[in-house]
Amino acid sequence: MEAPHNPAPVNSLGITVTSPEQMGDLGRRLAKLLRPGDLVMLTGELGAGKTTLTRGLGEGLGVRGAVTSPTFVIARVHPSLSEGPPLVHVDAYRLGGGLDEMEDLDLDVSLPESVIVVEWGDGKVEELSDDRLRVVIDRAVGDTTDEVREVTLTGVGTRWAEADLTLLSA
Ligand SMILES: Nc1ncnc2c1ncn2[C@@H]1O[C@H](COP(=O)(O)OP(=O)(O)O)[C@@H](O)[C@H]1O
Ligand SMILES: [Mg+2]
């Protein structure tokens, strides 16, 4: 007999963002929802705004150091300036082997006590947590300016089932 299939609960919200500043604001609002151990996966083409969102998130969390594109490193740890969780910012683009490599990075931080934000992590870092917030950033198509982005946030797993994603709307 087949094992019963219990699909993970899903909670989703779409937001239109019309400037880099608004993307930062969204990150700052998102920071208020996040707890230690949370995994945020950012998906979107180069220049979509993944790092811009993460920068706002880092400001909202109150962590040390400006969030930049981790070009020469795979992951960067931003410790909290107060009592909050550190931000672990991962660029998984060159992370071939997935989680094993992530563990090999020997980050001097406990992942269950951190907020982990991963760019380009699809298919690579899902094993880090059964619960994750997936953020897809798309450039708007059609007759819009270059700065319009459609952001779709999807919370997967019990952690996100009850979360009020509408708090993220401006
Ligand atoms: N609505 C927007 N949200 C985020 N970035 C935007 C937006 N409109 C224009 N931009 C610009 O697009 C670029 C996004 O870069 P970045 O955040 O590094 O993207 P990614 O990390 O996805 O490659 C920045 O130069 C930013 O100023
Ligand atoms: Mg980036």
Image: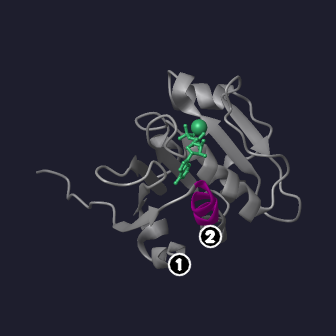
Q: Is residue 74 above or below residue 28?
A: above
The quadrant in which residue 118 appears is top right
Mark seen at residue 167 = 1
**Residue at x 72% of width, y 64% of height:** 60
Q: Residues within 10 Å of mark 1 (few under 14, many from 20)?
A: few
Q: Which residues are magenta?
A: 20-27
Instruction: Kindly identify the amino acid type of the residue bearing the numbered disc 2.
Output: Arg
Q: How far is disc 1 from disc 2 in space, using C-alphas?
A: 8 Å
Instruction: Kindly identify the amino acid type of the residue bearing the numbered disc 1.
Output: Leu
- The quarter in which the C terminus is drawn is bottom right
**Residue at x 67% of width, y 60% of height:** 36
Q: Which residue is mark 2?
A: 29
Q: Is residue 7 left or right of residue 60?
A: left
Reading the chain from its start, which is encountered first: label 1 or label 2? 2
Residue 22 shown in magenta: yes
> SS at mark 2?
helix
Are circles 1 and 2 on residues that touch, CB within 8 Å? yes
Image coordinates of residue 94 in percent, x first then y, are 55, 22
Name the magenta segment's main secondary structure. helix
